[in-house]
Image (cartoon, rainbow, N blue to C red):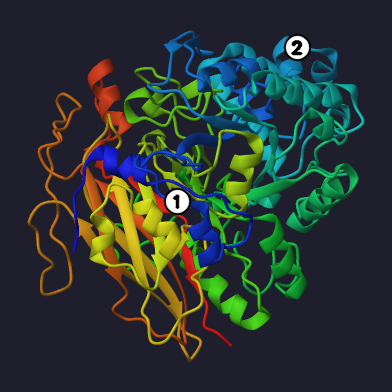
Amino acid sequence: MQRLVTATAIIVAMSSAAMSDGVPSKEASEGTFAAKPFSPYANRKFPEMPLWGETHLHTGLSLDAGAFGNILGPDDAWRFAKGEQITSSSGQPVRLSRPLDWMVLTDHTDLMGFAPDLQAGKPEILSDPKGLEWYEGYTKGGEEAGKSAFDLITNFSQMTLPEAIVTAYSPGADAFAFTWEKIVNSAETHNDPGRFTAFIGFEWTSVPKGFNLHRNVMFRDGAARALQVVPPVTQPPMGSTNPLDLYDWLEAYQEKTGGRAVAFSHNGNLSNGWMFPTEGTYHKGTVDQTYVERRAKWEPHYEITQIKGDGEAHPVLSPEDEFADYETWDVGNLDLTELKTEDMLRGEYAREALKQGLALEAKFGINPYKFGLGGATDSHTGLTTAEEENFFSKSVSVEPSPTRIEHPFIKSELGQIDGHQMVASGYTAVWAEENTRASIFDAFKRRETYATTGPRIGLRFFGGWEFTEEDTYTRSPAIAGYTKGVPMGGDMRPRAGDAVPSFLIAALRDPIGANLDRAQVVKGWLDAEGELHEKVFDVAWSGDREIDANGKLPEVGNTVNLETASWQNSIGSSELLTVWTDPDFDPNERAFYYVRVLEIPTPRWVVYDKIRFGIELPEEAQLIHQERAYSSPIWYTPEG
């Protein structure tokens, strides 16, 4: 069932071969590995470690981040991501435990230039009554600044911003152009190929009537191409909230510059069912041939976990999955102007979208929800902190303090999301040939990425037709993985004879983190009657536990000490390695498979706050959780 190997074995072995956007043939994969020299490490031309990064971070240039009091700029954010200690906007020294390898900085495009002018009290802001109100709230700081910022966000989402302010900070205005130049040039300054990759990017913040349809955009290119364009906005009269118009912009960028860019969405859990449509879209469009083709082309990736909740699964959609209710945000839309109903959930969560994608592929011949997975913070502090003990939260108003848990993330007449529900998540790991824009971007395109909720868990996942237990008896399982199968994000090679899918799975704990509880394979499939199904398989686990009569694996245990915010690695395993074969395979059914790896229980960030600040926590606050990693899926499509 499972095999444990040394840490060096897993992390060195979980390596990636060079691939184009397509899936390599078996012959091409075999050709990647040169004739074997005596040294098993000689002649390798593929990475030996995952590259860790952030795809979603805001600085003080974003309208809402600046209104909350963020005074850090792009240079500060880049320095922090590279491992430097800086001072946060609230005056606290802060540093990451380990540098990142790459990052995409994604300040909002709408109202570029507004936030610095708000902070400075520029005439363009103060001359408008609403602008003056926001400025006064900002200058008071603390809770008042938070209220002012949320009022700004509500006006933004409801499209009731003052017309004069929108005009002054939209494409064509000097403030907008100069801000875009600053963002691009800062990324160029900090990009250091081979050491640290700084991606040019932005957030296209579509949130019509509070329904979260946000997309981040990542460029493969540098300033020479990025400065030939200005990014698109969503506020009228110049902007649009329709994703199809974003696809038009991406197409125009590619045609004009010869460059490349992709988009990826996030927080479907705050869209009230509109993120993953299957029939009609929010903008009164139809999910037709054109829609599925364009979405498949421009959105190869999905941000599955971040500060505003985990988006893998929901217990209503996956009632048989005891781990589906993880960091769940299901109160309503982004600004809580509309509450959630259960019928909305189907269009909000990644696992369900992957399933619906199979049905749409059967109908249209292309799968619009064939995406790789990643995690991000969506921090608006300029600080990419995704560690529980080092969590600087969503905005400056709730950076570490004795009272930050008391402040709701959002509150309306309909309900609220409490401060203790913030999630210290997440990061994206990429299997790329080298640490450069081109190599990492190409890995995103082929979906060879995985998400974690913060820990730097090593994870490799290969699918094929002939993996055996012997493929785990090696320090280099990736050689078998690429030779005999395809990596995460790929399509299974054509089936030969009556073969059954087999999967090579390797997981390694974060070197400074918690041990692993288990590795699971999540399968989704479309049956002959057009019905969609899912099943979660425990495939490797720590200790001598056994699957019970109900098909469940007993809990791993719990060593968390809430009085010291600590745990012990006396349970769990440091590594898991196995080959698993699908026992329910039907060659006539479309299917996908992805891996979910769970850590042993550890304290949430609120417990660290309790210890450090000597505060009492709300009774309803979640204190312990099991952090996790999600691989990108591997898909199987029947022939014919």
Tell me which label, 2 or 1, sits earlier in the chain. Answer: 1
Q: Is residue 127 above or below residue 93?
A: below
Q: Nearer the viewer, residue 399 or 294?
A: 294
Instruction: Give x and y (percent) for residue 252.
Output: 86, 49
Q: Nearer the viewer, residue 365 or 442?
A: 442
Q: Can residue 129 be seen here?
A: no
Q: How many marks?
A: 2
Disc 2, SS: loop
Disc 1 marks a residue whose amino acid type is: Ala
Q: Is residue 391 above or below residue 275?
A: above
Q: Which residue is rendered at x = 40% and y = 19% of the image?
A: 400
Q: Residues within 10 Å of mark 1 (few under 14, many from 20)?
A: few
| Residue assigned mark 1 | 35
| Residue assigned mark 2 | 121
Instruction: Give x and y (percent) for residue 619.
Output: 24, 38
Disc 2 marks a residue whose amino acid type is: Gly
